[in-house]
Amino acid sequence: MAFTAQDVKRLREMTNAGMMDCKKALSETDGDFDAAIAFLREKGLAAAAKKAGRVAAEGMVYVNVAECGAAVMVEVNSETDFVAKNEEFQKFCAGLGQAILENNPADVVALAECKFPGSDLTVSQMQNEKVLTIGENIQIRRFVRLDNTMKNVAYVHGGGKIGVLVRMNVEGIDNNDALVTLGRDLGMQAASMRPQWLNREEVPAETLEAEKHILMQQTINEGKPEAVAQKIVMGRINKFYEENCLLEQAFVKENKISVQKHVDAVAKELGGKIAIENCIRFEKGEGIAKREDDFAAEVAKMTGK
């Protein structure tokens, strides 16, 4: 089956593949468009596989609260910060957010099989398309979806470096602007102060016991008698809560009161009740070991020395 330059151009527009690759695909498939697209996708998948082993610790955290009130937050990693600023990468992240809102997948594996919004491709296929066209390893690391049975507020720091979702149980308050302001203030608090838990009740028993043991040994090593050390340790455990539990931290905008007291004050002013049910914080690349290039060795390799 013969094909023309217009066919090559059309295939390129459909697949974002290179002109010569499109020409080769049409040649290999005797001008069959569907077969040519399959040919290019197979080639793209092979290219993606080669990139899959490269460290992806950059990227962005995409956060969105939909008009219906449901919320989504997803971390998508790339190899470089430059790609995270790419419009196509950002559109891909937004599309993932929409797919999560629409399908409510159980995990990243289930998300991969969902249809990508505005496309006939699955999320996994679209991901591989982006790897091919953008030229970097792209990984969907994690996500969270919150339903609209409570008030959800999003906070984004540094253009997607950190994302926070704050979930509030609200009674007797209709002032949406005030609730959004409160939620964003708490999101900023979580972004900057990195609380590990919402409140002291969420601290795992084993973590608390380990902390008490460490503090007890420190206090005894300071020369305090064990009976006195017990009281000192209890005071230091309260300090541990204040540093690691969001609601017990000093409020960043008014450090003379705790976050919980600020929430209570806002609720009183608005004439209702507010309970912070959850605060979820994603920071791009946290916990991923980034590649450290040996610059001197790379230069030596390039110069043959």
Image (tube, rainbow, N blue to C red):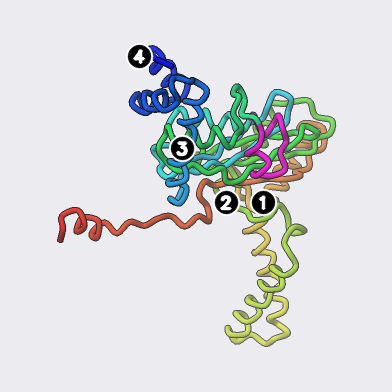
Q: Which span of residues is magenta-colored?
A: 98-114
Callout 3: few (<14), some (14-19), or many (20+) C-alpha neighbours within 10 Å?
many
Q: Which amino acid, mark 4?
A: Ala
Q: Quickly name the residue at label 3.
A: 131
Q: Which amino acid, mark 1?
A: Leu
Please say whether residue 105 is one of the residues in the magenta stretch. Answer: yes
Q: Quickly name the residue at label 4.
A: 5
Q: Which amino acid, mark 2?
A: Met
In the rendering, at what x and y percent does residue 239 appear?
65, 64
- Indicate the quadrant where residue 31 lies: top left
Q: Quickly name the residue at label 2.
A: 193
222, 25: nearer the viewer: 25
Determine the secondary structure under disc 3. Answer: helix
In the rendering, at what x and y percent does residue 13 appear?
43, 19
210, 170: nearer the viewer: 210
Closer to the chain start, of discs 4 and 2, is 4
Q: The C terminus lies in which quarter of the figure?
A: bottom left
From mark 4 to mark 1, how far is it between C-alphas? Answer: 61 Å
Residue placed at 71% from the left, 29% from the top?
102
Relative to residue 296, is residue 100 depicted above or below?
above
Tag nearer the camera, 3 or 1: 3
Closer to the chain start, of discs 3 and 2, is 3
In the rendering, at what x and y percent does residue 35 appear?
50, 26
Tag nearer the camera, 4 or 1: 4
Closer to the chain start, of discs 3 and 1, is 3
Label 1 with label 2: CB-CB less than 8 Å = yes
Relative to residue 188, is residue 194 depicted above or below?
below
Callout 4: few (<14), some (14-19), or many (20+) C-alpha neighbours within 10 Å?
few
Determine the secondary structure under disc 2. Answer: helix
Tag nearer the camera, 3 or 2: 3
In the rendering, at what x and y percent does residue 178 appear?
69, 29
